[in-house]
Image: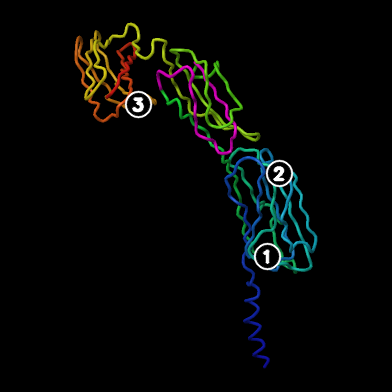
Amino acid sequence: MKKLISLLLIIYLPFSSFSQDTIISSLPQITICPGNVIIPVSVENFNNIASISLIIKYDTSYLKYQSYENLNPVFNSGLFFINATNQQIIISWFSLQPVTIGNGSILDLKFEYLGHSPIQLNWDVATAGSCVYTDLDGNELPSKFFNGIIENHMQIPGILNPPNFAINQPTNLGFSWTGSNCAPHYELQISEDSTFQQVSISQNSIFGTTIQYNGLTENTNYFSRIRGYNPYDTTLWSTIVRFKTKGPDAINETEKNAPLSIQYINNPVTDNIKLNLFVNKYISLNIRLVNATGNQFTICECFRPVLGKSELLINTNNYSAGSYYLILYGSTSTEQFRICKKFIIQ
């Protein structure tokens, strides 16, 4: 009988000493808009715990601790303590009655998120005794800790209209752009200077993603950009969009002293655009078609017409009927120029 009892103890004791599963503690990885945010402190294998001692470190420049809520009711017995100080939150609890959650949450932490990305939420596992669970005998229990990250859901908007390099735009122009998720308001800037050192127009407090602006100057090159903002954060400026308003003579444009002239263009066009050109210098041409909505189609690049008179045919069978602009971007060894002609495809 004594031998049997001894054998049972040998079998039972090793099993009981390793029966506690590793406690997993996790902070979430989330993408949210700036504002109030709830951070759950989640656990797994939380069984027969008599005390907890936890420290969570965070950047107080972008996270402002407000309060905690939804404390798991198992912690109503014993002594519970929480405090936010020196860029960290300290959570501790002790009871003579061990508690079990299994898989669930200890509590929720409520912050005010001021933007910026990414923001780290880190367990202070480097400091001895700072992230510890114990049983009733004071034995430290096996545990693992997984840090959290907060990513900003705000996105940089992008201008949709006018398209980049659009020409012949009206002086009462409608602007539109992609939304920025978390930003209900936008600021639009328009300048004749690509560096925006001198801003011609600055329109802020725009609600939504469109605005109609009246008062642009005719025959002028402009640069535009947009950014979104809310009470907590502001996005970076969008990619700059360049456009040019049309002149008072409507559409056709030839820069003075250009070494190329269009002596004839058939209008309207049925199958082919027929151009009679006259060139007085060696030039290189990039030729594009632009439809009424500003979409550009490259016809050819680095075309080199002969000196003097020449004829150029451009097939238009793949283009739908409507108004178009034929734009010739030219360059010599010392200068650049542009010629624009309006025509109709039937």
> For the residue carrying disc 2, how many other residues have a C-alpha within 10 Å: few (<14), some (14-19), or many (20+)?
some
Tell me which amino acid carries mark 3.
Gln
Q: Are marks 2 and 3 in contact (CB under 8 Å)?
A: no
Q: Earlier in the sequence, mark 2 or mark 3?
A: 2
Which stretch is magenta?
A: 166-192
Q: Quadrant of residue 198?
A: top right
Secondary structure found at label 3:
strand
> For the residue carrying disc 1, how many other residues have a C-alpha within 10 Å: few (<14), some (14-19), or many (20+)?
some
Q: Give the answer, above or below, for where 23 lies relative to 281.
A: below
Residue picked out by circle 1: 101
Looking at the image, the residue that sits furthest to the bottom is: 1
Secondary structure found at label 2:
loop
Q: Are marks 1 and 2 in contact (CB under 8 Å)?
A: no
Of 103 and 162, nearer the camera is: 162
Q: Is residue 183 magenta?
A: yes
Residue picked out by circle 3: 296
> For the residue carrying disc 3, how many other residues have a C-alpha within 10 Å: few (<14), some (14-19), or many (20+)?
some
Distance from disc 2 to disc 3, alpha carbons, whole Å, reads 54 Å
Tell me which amino acid carries mark 2.
Gln
Instruction: Name the residue: 28% across, 29% down.
Output: 319
Q: How many marks?
A: 3
Quadrant where the N terminus lies? bottom right
The mark found on residue 87 in the picture is: 2
Of 233 and 273, nearer the camera is: 273
Instruction: Provide residue 267's location: percent of width, then percent of height.
Output: 26, 17
Secondary structure found at label 1:
loop
